[in-house]
Amino acid sequence: MITTRFTELFGIEHPIVQGGMQWVGRAELVSAVANAGALGFLTALTFPTPEDLIKEVQKCREMTDKPFGVNLTILPTLKKVPYTEYRQAIVESGVKIVETAGYNPREHLPDLKRAGVKVIHKCTSVRHGLTAERIGCDAISMDGFECAGHPGEDDIPNLVLLPVARDKIKIPMIASGGLGDARGLVAVLALGADGMNMGTRFMATQEAPVHENVKQQMVENDELTTDLIFRTLKNTARVAKNTVSQEVVSIEAKGDATIGDLAHLVSGQRGRVVLEKGDMDYGIWSAGMVQGLINDVPTVKELVDRIMEEAQQIIDRLRNAYS
Amino acid sequence: MITTRFTELFGIEHPIVQGGMQWVGRAELVSAVANAGALGFLTALTFPTPEDLIKEVQKCREMTDKPFGVNLTILPTLKKVPYTEYRQAIVESGVKIVETAGYNPREHLPDLKRAGVKVIHKCTSVRHGLTAERIGCDAISMDGFECAGHPGEDDIPNLVLLPVARDKIKIPMIASGGLGDARGLVAVLALGADGMNMGTRFMATQEAPVHENVKQQMVENDELTTDLIFRTLKNTARVAKNTVSQEVVSIEAKGDATIGDLAHLVSGQRGRVVLEKGDMDYGIWSAGMVQGLINDVPTVKELVDRIMEEAQQIIDRLRNAYS
């Protein structure tokens, strides 16, 4: 067992987090993560209405009696999303841990704080981390250039981003991006983080509600099998490299792509078909460079136990190396 | 003192390397690094002729009785460079450690091996590392996306690159890029490296033969103050962001730049004027993201001692975190 400020603040056993993943953050995975002693997040917008989110929280509670949270991601979307209603549903559900991502979560904080909810905000830069701390977030999840989904536009990897952030930001910080095993956990703890988030790695577990084809693809892919898309729109996303991502890259390389030109290729519903039906070249789906470290599809508990056991071995090796 | 396969193979006290840096890898810095118990490299092509390199080796030997090496960087250049003669000068000088970089060092290995020289090859990808191992290099220096100079075209940061490489490559490996303090050292040891290389961080030391303006600029700069240039030529270089690097970026963004268009801006002689005369916007000069972690200009010994002391504290903190 490794104890940090993060495990103490959130009342969890291991400094390991399964942060929000659209379509994937469902009760099956989140309860397995909680039961393994780590901290999982249901993803609010995976559920079509705030009422469906409340039902998923109830379902997850029936599957675990340990803490879990809800992710609320606020991003530019073509269709208006009722964020306030989702926030109210979170409060009503009694969940006490929220991960916010995307835009500044300022408008959601007073309600959440009043309800005794602790907030972790996902950041991709030191300046965003400082803002999160100033507006009253309880912790940050710092996303390096390695990560799947939205790494921001600065392209600073965790090896540099984490220690620079640690020198300037006081609240607990977990690291996100490029992490999939004990080596990564010990590395980010050394760099100043209080724990690690894993996204892609948790997708390749038995309990992840993701088609077997997707899990096998992550085992086959390596660290080079990602693409950065939407760079020209200043809304960069790292996704698994496939025929669709390559088509987007090629359209963007021509220099004048608009979100309208790309919308049919990159629609969330198409990504959902990849994840749920395993139709691998139907749309884009998020996966990070950590694919290079994924060689199996264990249960969540096997994965978490292996990481914690190997982390102890690594720390012992480091201890024995100095004299 | 931290002992690894790397410190044992090269007979050094600390797992810290100051790898080749054009114009900077001179006897003043390299002897200070050796005297601090780390491994420094003279940069062969900094000296106008092979005979001048031999003289610099002799000068360095008068300043330290500890091991040091010579870097031989083989890159595309406008002017033909007599690599064979430089290699012969290295052998003749009696130096027993060489760092090769750039192209595959195959043609230089038989001579070096015959002379009992150990070779570390700088790589930016797992496939280059595997090649280096296969052709008989003794160790590799793995350069992540973070690094100054030439990070390659794959853009894989060390957090992912090192453990993936460790799983596939058996010979000792040091990490390079994004490293400037004890946190980085412990992190890369956890990730599977046997030591760390620092370039930019060693430029900001008292003994580095670099103008005071350059050292102060590195203290003022942060992790965001770098530019990637020559991406369009598939010979990407990470340099300190300044008016010249921004001009190169802007020319490349137009899409059809040739090395001829850029040559007057990026000439090595102009970079040399920046480093030696402190004329900060006269040319491009290399510096990595680790600038965000540079806050002072210590002596080399102060830097190395501080890193080793803090590394021990970090390992003790990790040891105390688990129960």
Image (cartoon, coloured by chain):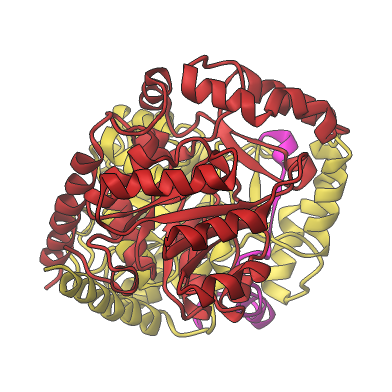
Chain colours: A yellow, B red
In this view, the residue in front, B93 or A47, is B93
Whether residue A55 sits left or right of residue A82 in the image: it is: left
Q: Quadrant of the N terminus of chain A?
A: bottom left
Q: Is residue A21 above or below residue B106?
A: above
In this view, the residue in front, B62 or B311, is B62
Q: Is residue B160 above or below residue A253?
A: below
In this view, the residue in front, A260 or B115, is B115
Q: Is residue B163 above or below residue A263?
A: below
* Figure disc tally: 0
For the point 86% across and 49% down, the residue is: A250
Whether residue A283 sits left or right of residue A50 in the image: it is: right
> Is residue B49 part of the magenta span, yes or no?
no
Q: Quadrant of the C terminus of chain A?
A: bottom left
Where in the figure is residue A155, as x and y percent of width and height?
55, 42
Residue B256 can be seen in this image: yes
Where in the figure is residue A167, as x and y percent of width and height?
27, 36
Where in the figure is residue B245, as x and y percent of width and height?
64, 25
Where in the figure is residue B249, as x and y percent of width and height?
71, 28
In this view, the residue in front, A270 or A261, is A261
Residue A199 can be seen in this image: no
Q: Is residue A185 above or below residue B55?
A: below
Whether residue B282 sits left or right of residue A156 in the image: it is: right
- Looking at the rendering, the stretch of residues picked out in magenta corresponds to A205-234
Whether residue B118 sits left or right of residue A255 in the image: it is: left
For the point 41% across and 79% down, the residue is: A300
